[in-house]
Amino acid sequence: MSRPFVTAIVVAHDGGRWLGETLQGLLRQSRLPDRVAGVDNGSRDNSAALIKQALGEGNLLGLPRSTGFGEAVAQVLDRLPYADEEWIWLLHDDCAPDPHALEALLWAAQQDPKAAVLGPKLRDWLDRRRLLEVGVTVDRTGRRDTGLEPREFDQGQHDGTREVLSVSTAGMLIRRDVWERVGGLDPFFPLFRDDLDLCWRVRNAGHRVLVVTSAVAWHAEAAARRRRRITVSGDHPRRLDRRNAIFVIMANLPFRAMLWALLRNVFGSLFRTVLYVVGKQPASALDELVALGSILIHPFRLLGARRARRDGRKKGYNRIRRLLTPPGEAYRRLADMAQSFLAGESAAEGRHHASADEDDAVAIDDSGSVKRFLGRPGLWLVAALTVITLVAERSLPGDGLLGGGALVPVSGGASDLWGFYTEGFHDIGLGSTDWAPPYVAVVAALSTLALGKTWLAVSVLLLGSVPLAGACAYLATRRIVPAVSARMWLAATYALLPVATGAIAAGRLGTAVVFVLLPVYANLGVQLMAPDRRRARRAAWGFGLLLAVGTAFVPLVYPLVAVLAVLAAVAYGGVRRGLTVSIAIVLAVPVALLLPWLAGLVTDPGRILLEAGLHDPALVDQALAPQALLTFSPGGPGLPPFWVTAGLIATALAALLLRRQRMIVAIGWGIALYGVLAAILVSRISVAGARAWPGVPLALAATGLLVLAGLTAHRLRELRAGGGIKKAAAALVIAVAFSTPLLAAGFWLYTGVRGPLSGHAPDVLPALAVVVTPHGERTLVIKGSSFTVLHRRTPLIGEMELPVASDARARLAVAAEGLVGGRGGTDAAELAKQGVALVVVAPPVSDELVRTLDSQPSLQRESLSDAGGMWRVAEPFTRVPVRPGDALHTPWLWTQAALVLVVLVLAAPGRREPAVEQVEAPAPVLVGV
C-alpha cells in the first residue's frame, strides 16, 4: 500500500494564547504531514505572526474575521491541487496534538478501508488528565452526549478504536475525496455542530467514522467556553449551538423520525425554558426559544437542507439509529438537568461539551456511588430515627382511619380537598361562605404528590415528623454548625424533643409541620445575613414562603418570628446592607399569600393561639407546672418525664462558663428565654373554654439552646486536649448532652404513642346515615357533651374549623341540649329548621340517654348497637339554602396561585453558571519548521 498524502490545515482566530503550542505539536509529529497550510481569520492578536514564523509566509492565508471554520478550510482546499490518496488533517488553533497523533490516525485508517473520518481522543487543555471527547452522539432533540461523566479522568477506561456517530473537527482526519463528494463542512454552520453534520453525511454516503483513542489531542474549547469573542455570528454561543443542534437533527433524520423529533424539540424546549426561568436565567430561556423559533420560521431553508441530504438518508439511518443516545438516557439527562436547576447547581447539560468547571482540579473519589451514599452520617441518623419512630408507633397502624385528638379522621382524597378549598359555598354543617383554612391547600398539594392519597400525606407529615425534623435539622445546620458529630447530636436531640412526641400522640398536625420547618427557618435566617445580597434576597423569599406555610398551620408562628425579625433589623440593619428589605419581604409574603383568611384572625385574635385541627380541652394541661415549661415539655398526652431534657439544659448552662463566643451564648440563651416567656404567656390564655398549647414556643426555645450548644461544641475538643480535670469535665458534658436523645428515644420506644391518636378511628358518620339522607339532610352527631352537624360524609381536614354564624349555632346548641336533657317542646322542630333530619349518638351510648331520646315524640329510633344509636327527626326538615359566595373568591384564588408561583421563582436558588475564564495570554512560543 502506497504512503498516504496528508494535508494539515490550521485555522486560527484570536488564538495566540494557544496557537504556539498547537503549532509545536503539529511540527513535532512522528509522522510529519506532507503539506501544511495556515489560515488566519482576521485575528487581532499575534496569531498571524505565529503561523508565518512556524509555517512560512507562503503557507499563510488571511481571511476576514467573519469567516467560519468550514469556509476557511474550503478556501484553502480550493487553492491546493488534489493529490492521490490524500487525507486532510484539520486542527483548531486551540487544539494541540500529541506527537504520535497523526501516526496513530493513519495506522487506524489503514486497518479499516471503509473509514473515511477519524478523530483523536480529546482531553482538557488546562487539566491534561480530564476527558472531553471519545466520540460524540446526540439524542433526537440534538443534545450532545459524549458518554462521559463530569470531570471524568482518562484512565484508559474508554480506550480502543471504535465506530461513533461523530468526532470533533479539532484533530479530525478525513479523506479528501469523501470531503469533496459530501460537500465538506456546511457554511450554514460557521461554528458548532458542523462536525456532527459532516459526519452524518459521511455515514449516509456509506463510510465509517472512527474514534482512535491512541491518538490524543488537548482542546481548550475556547469558543464554546467563551474564552474568546465569536465574530462569525452575532448570536450568543448558547443560542447558536442550540439552533445548529436542532437544524442538524431536522435536516438529517428521515421524515417520520423528523416529525417525532420536531414534537420532542417543541415540548422539550418549552420545558427547558420554564427551568431557565425558575433558575433565574432569562437570557438562557430566551436563547432556547429563539433557537427553536429560528428553525420554525424558516421552513424553506430546512426543506432545502433536507433535499440536499436526501441521498442515502433513509438507508443510512438504519446504521445511525443504534449510535444515537437511547431514549431512556435522554430522559434521565433531562431529569438531571431539572434536579441541578432546583439545587442551584451548574449542570453539564446544555454546554457544548460535557465537561465541568475547569478550575475544579480535585479528583473524584471513584469508590462507587453506593458506598459514598451509605457513608453519609446524615443517612444513618435519619435511618435510626425512622426505626425508632416505627417501633414507637407500633400501635397506630390499623384497618380504620387515622384520627383522634386534634386530628379529625383522615378521609377523602386530594380532589376532595381541592374542591373544599376552592368552592365559594361550603355545603357542610350548617353551610358556610367563609374561606377555607389555607393549610388545606398545602395538604391538598402534598396529597396530589402522594397520588391523591390524603392519608399518606398526613401520615408522612404527622407520623414521620420525627425523622423529617431530624433530617431538616441536620441539613439546615450545615452552614451553622460545621462539626458533623455536633450536628448529629443536635439533629437527634431536636427530633426527639417532647414537643414532637406530644404532637404525634395528640394528633397535632399543625405543630408537627412547624416542628419540621423550624430548623429551616433558622438556616434561612442566617442566610439573610449573608454578604451576597442576591443570596440573601433569595433566602428572604424562601423564608417568607415557608413562613406562610407555617402560619397557615399554626398562626402563632408569625408573631413569634416577626418579633425576632424586628430585633434583628434593629441590631444589624445598619451593618448589613439590604437586611431591612429582606426582613420586610419575609414578613410581607405571608400576609400577601394568606389574605383574606389572615384578616379573620385579626378580628378574632384568640384564633391566633390555635392550630390546624380540633381544639379539645382534654389535650391541654389546664395548669402546666413550671418545671415542665423550663424543660420544654408543653403538657398533654404522650410526653416523657420532665427530667428527660435536663441534659440539654445542663449543657446550655455549661456554655455560660465559656469566656469566648459570648455573643453566640447570649443570642442562644436570648432566643431560649424568649420562647419560654412566650410559652408561659400562651399557656395562661384560654380560648373557647380551654388553655392554648405552648408546643411551638417551646420548640423555638429549644432550637436556640441546641444551636448554641452545637456552635460551642468544638471547645470540648480543646478541653479534652488539656488533660486532667479539663478532660474529665469535657467527658462529663458530653455524657450529659447525649443523655437527652438517648433517654427520649428509650422512653418513647418503651411507652409507644400514648394518646388519643389512633389508626383505628371509626367513621364518624355511620353508613346507614349516609344511605337514608340522600336529599341534603343534615345529621346531628352527639358525643358526650359536644355535638357537630355533618352532611352525608365524615368531615374533611379543615372543615370543622370553618366559622359558623353565632346565632344559628346558638339556636342549634339550645335545641341539642334540650333534646339530650329531655326538655321536649320545639327542640326537634328547631333542628328540622336547621336542616337536621337525623340524630346520631356516638358510642358509648348510655341507657339513660336512649330512654330520653325514645321519649321524644318527634324522634323515631332507626338503630341501636354498640357502634352507636340513630334517631330520625319526624318534623319536616328545611333544606340549608345555598348562599352565594364572595364575588372576589375565584379571582383571588387565581391571584393567590400566581403569587405563589412568583415567590417560588424568586426563592429558587437559580443555576450557577461557571464564570467565563479570563486566561492570561502567555508569551508567544517560538516555533520553527
Image: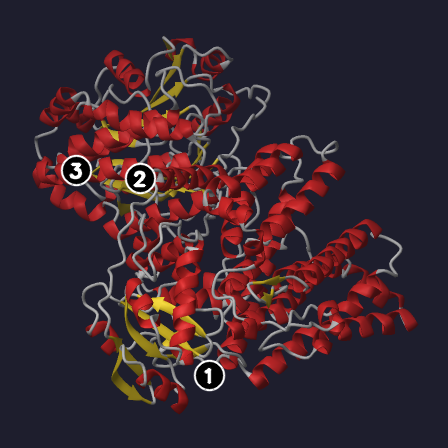
Q: Is residue 33 left or right of residue 922?
A: left
Q: Is residue 423 left or right of residue 697?
A: left
* Residue 466 placement (x, y as % from top left): 54, 68
Tell me the SS state at disc 1: loop
For disc 2, the marked residue is 271
* Residue 472 placement (x, y as % from top left): 56, 59
* Residue 65 placement (x, y as % from top left): 38, 11
For disc 1, the marked residue is 395
Q: From the viewer's perspective, is the residue at label 3 or at label 2 nearer?
A: 2
Q: Are marks 3 and 2 in contact (CB under 8 Å)?
A: no
Q: Report the residue at 32% width, 38% height from top.
A: 887
Counting residues from the start of the chain, the first of labels 3 and 2 encountered is: 3
Q: Distance between the residues labelled 1 and 3?
A: 70 Å
For disc 3, the marked residue is 207
Q: From the viewer's perspective, is the residue at label 1 or at label 3 nearer?
A: 1
Neighbor class of circle 2 (other Cα within 10 Å; few <14, some 14-19, many 20+) is some
Q: In this view, does 619 lie to the left or right of 862?
A: right
Q: Report the residue at 47% width, 82% height from top.
A: 394
Counting residues from the start of the chain, the first of labels 2 and 1 encountered is: 2
Splitting the image into 4 quarters, where does residue 740 fall? Answer: bottom right
Q: Report the residue at 76% width, 61% height from top.
A: 713
543 is higher (above) or lower (below) than 708: above
Tell me the SS state at disc 2: helix
272 is higher (above) or lower (below) than 680: above
Is residue 412 or residue 586 the one in the foreground?
A: 412
Splitting the image into 4 quarters, where does residue 643 fall? Answer: bottom right
- Which amino acid does the dot numbered 1 rest on? Ser
Is residue 366 or residue 770 the one in the foreground?
A: 770
Q: How far apart are marks 2 and 1 (CA)?
A: 45 Å
